[in-house]
Amino acid sequence: MTEHQVGTREEWLRARKELLEREKELTHRSDELARQRRELPWVRVDKEYRFETDAGTKTLAELFHGRSQLLAYHFMFGPEYTAGCPVCSSGADTFDGAVPHLKARDVTFLCVSRAPLQRLQAYERRMGWTFPWVSSLGSDFNFDFEVSHTEEELAQFLKGDVPPVVAQLAAACGTDPAGYLAEAPGLSAFVLSDGVVYHTYSTYARGLEIMLGFYPLLDRVPEGRNEDSEEFWIRRHDEYETARAAGTG
């Protein structure tokens, strides 16, 4: 027998209307935050970054591909990884569908990682994706936008007990915790105006939940995200069946 509160349709409707008012308030606050993001000052990008792409070496300005706005998702796939981060990969399953709609609004979307381009291409084929993905290996781009870290920066954190989930994700990427934590996810926005590139916005950590389209959906079912257990459940989309068969997912 269910332990959750059970009521009549009328009771549900009354509670739902009360909740709807709070949802509307949240939507209005989100609209205001979006306006404030657009009003952030722009920062000129003077450093000459170079990226390896499917079409050869490109500058940051050339990555705009004729558009005035660029969204770059910093995908966790470091030089020591043999496969991309499972969490980044779960979000990337939705990127292909977004690309044509962003293009229609003068926005180029791509992913950028420090792994060699050939490894990124092979992983993209495995996952069945087609969105643009470039390698920043050899440049300061990831470091300058705070998504790659040196051994010195990580030393203090690695002195303590590394959470089990970090070890799990590191193993899934074919590296150790130090190699895994050398990378972090992020989303950065840029604009190209009169031939000059400006950095306009970046977000990290929970600010990236917008990239994980399944989370808002889980927030609307009875059990929610159901992440109270210590087991980390997210897998690459081609690994869930194997995990279930092994009793680990």
Image: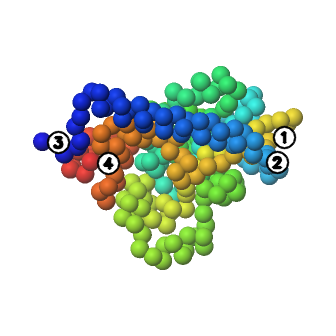
Residue type at mark 4 is Asn
Residue furthest top as drawn: 104
Asked whether the beta carbons under mark 3 and mark 2 sit within 8 Å of each other, the answer is no
Q: What residue type is labelled 2?
A: Arg
Q: What element carries label 1?
A: strand
The count of marks equals 4
Residue occupied by mark 4 = 226
198 with respect to 80 (left or right): right
Residue linked to disc 3: 2
- Above or below residue 102? Residue 85 is below
Instruction: Give the residue type at disc 1.
Output: Val
The amino acid pointed to by label 3 is: Thr
Q: Mark 1 points at which residue?
A: 196
Q: Do the residues labelled 2 and 1 touch (CB within 8 Å)?
A: yes
If you read the primary sequence from the N terminus, does the residue marked by circle 1 or circle 4 appear first?
1
Residue corresponding to mark 2: 44
Residue at 23% from the left image edge and 43% from the top image edge: 4
Residues under labels 1 and 4: Cα distance?
A: 46 Å
Instruction: Judge from the rendering whether residue 15 lies leftward or rightward of residue 79; answer left or right.
Output: left
Please tell me whether mark 3 sits on a helix, a strand or a loop.
Answer: loop
- Name the residue at 48% across, 38% down: 22
Q: How far is disc 3 from disc 2 in space, using C-alphas?
A: 58 Å
Task: Name the residue located 74 percent from the left edge and 29 percent from the top edge.
Answer: 67
